Amino acid sequence: MGVFTFESENCFTIPPAKLFKAYVLEGNKLFPKVVPHAIKSVEILEGDGGAGSILKLHFGEASPEFRYATHKIELVDKDNLMFSYSVIEGDILRDIVEKISFETKVVPSGDGGSIWKSKGTYYTKGDFVLEEDKIKAADNC
């Protein structure tokens, strides 16, 4: 198994607590309404949406090659605006990745907005090597 990690930062004009609430705490209900072409629906298979929960995301027509991804929520820390989850199943993993884990933290940007800091770790199957430029998210700060 290979392991590849990347980090990214994305800036938003939204204050940290408000961004965390919308994306993490209410994202399961919000995304299918705001971006139905990307995420058609979210099912909670186990749990209440918090740590330990298993969610199944059904993708919309914006990603015709992918139908779904199953996420396991590892951490939801409302006080420190931290969130982590792993993609554990789905056609998005193809036959080359065992799982993908994400750790995020939302911090103030200094201008009233937020910086969404993310670390993604890909666990590949066998001796498959990921090409960094194919998966690395571009920073927008």
Image (cartoon, helix red, strand yellow):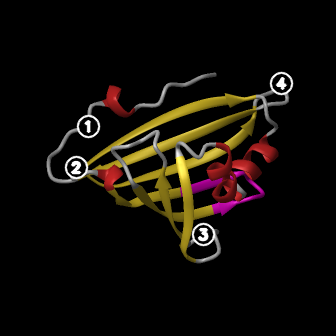
What is the crowding at mark 2: few (fewer than 14 residues within 10 Å), some, or many (at least 20)? some
What is the crowding at mark 1: few (fewer than 14 residues within 10 Å), some, or many (at least 20)? some
Q: Quadrant of residue 91?
A: bottom left
Residue 130: x and y in percent read: 26, 37
Q: Secondary structure at mark 1?
A: loop
Q: Split into 4 quadrants, where in the image is the C terminus?
A: top right
Counting residues from the N terminus, which is met first, the one under dot 4 or under dot 3? Answer: 3
Residue with the mark numbered 4: 111
How far apart are labels 3 and 2 at the CA level? 27 Å
Residue 64: x and y in percent read: 38, 43
The residue depicted at 75 percent of the width and 43 percent of the height is 19
Counting residues from the N terminus, which is met first, the one under dot 1 or under dot 4? Answer: 4
Counting residues from the N terminus, which is met first, the one under dot 2 or under dot 4? Answer: 2
Q: Amino acid at mark 1?
A: Leu
How far apart are labels 1 and 3 at the CA level? 29 Å
Q: Amino acid at mark 4?
A: Asp
The residue depicted at 59 percent of the width and 22 percent of the height is 140
- Tell me if residue 70 is in the magenta stretch: no
Residue with the mark numbered 1: 130
Front of the two marks 2 and 4: 2
Residue with the mark numbered 3: 51
- Residue at the far bottom in the pictured view: 46
Q: Which residues fall within the magenta stretch?
A: 76-84
Q: Are marks 1 and 2 in contact (CB under 8 Å)?
A: yes
How far apart are labels 1 and 4 at the CA level? 36 Å
